[in-house]
Amino acid sequence: MRKTLPRDTNAKEAIQDDVVIPVLIGLAILTGFILISLGVDIEVCCLTSFLIVLLPIIALLILFSKEEKRATEDRERCIQRVRFEEEQRVRFEEEQRAKGLVKFKDQWGTPEQVKRWREIDIGLENNFADYSPYEFEEFIAKLFRKMGYSVETTSKSKDFGADIIAKKDDETVAIQVKKNAVGNNVGAPVIQQTLGSMWKFKADKSIVITTSDFTVQAEEQARGAPVELWNRKILEGMVRKYFIDIEAE
């Protein structure tokens, strides 16, 4: 199979690597023999054979030179276009920022608009309804990473009452996550499980986080115990603090 000549390949190397020269040499030799057999002077035969090889090579060199020039010009135009588009983008963003606007994904808005868009995007608008339980646990893990903790999630089949273990400095926190619909409040048994997980994970304290609220019994169970109860209101406040307000600054 004949090679395809890359546009930025050196023309002389391309000719040497191709089948053109062997073919031309063979054709020149054949032509020389034919002319000699016809009684043509040997010097004329040699000159004719030489020209048969030389002239096509010159033509190919000119052709390849033009191709390389065209390729170089195309690259220059492409670079100039990319540079122009980048300058336009930077200029546009500077103009938007000068107006006091903030970028969120592919759109610009006022800081208040962007906060609203972030709330919708992150799930505050519908109480994280679009998250699966597993995705919500990963989101809470991300929240604690933003709070400065190193985080790992526990086994889904055997979590021993804790979905997430968060560590910062010398503190270890066992976290239980309950993605419940509003009105489906977390009861005392969940608090008991979470407190029990502290021994398993050698935690200093525990936190139960829910998208709903806690029953009276759950709150009584937590009273005086090393456990924090984060209901929907507290959770939304933490999400705004670490995901929305901090990014809008």
Image: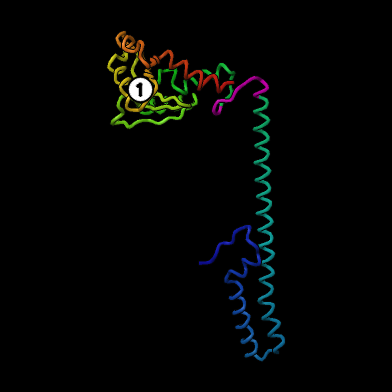
Q: Is residue 233 above or below residue 201?
A: above
> Can you identify the residue that label 1 sits on?
176
Q: Is residue 241 above or below residue 105?
A: above
Residue 133, image x and y in percent? 35, 25
For the image, the number of numbered tags is 1
Mark 1 nearby-residue class (10 Å; few <14, some 14–19, many ≥20) = many
Q: Nearer the viewer, residue 60 or 174?
A: 174
Quarter holding residue 92: top right
Q: Which residues are magenta?
A: 96-106
Residue at 49% over, 24% down: 147
**Tag 1: amino acid:** Gln
Residue 22, image x and y in percent? 59, 76
- What kind of colouring is applied to the model shown? rainbow
Q: Is residue 153 above or below residue 113?
A: below
Circle 1 — which element? strand
Quarter holding residue 220: top left
Residue 88, image x and y in percent? 67, 33
* Residue 34 sits inside the magenta stretch: no
In the rendered image, which quarter contains the C terminus?
top right
Residue 44, image x and y in percent? 71, 85
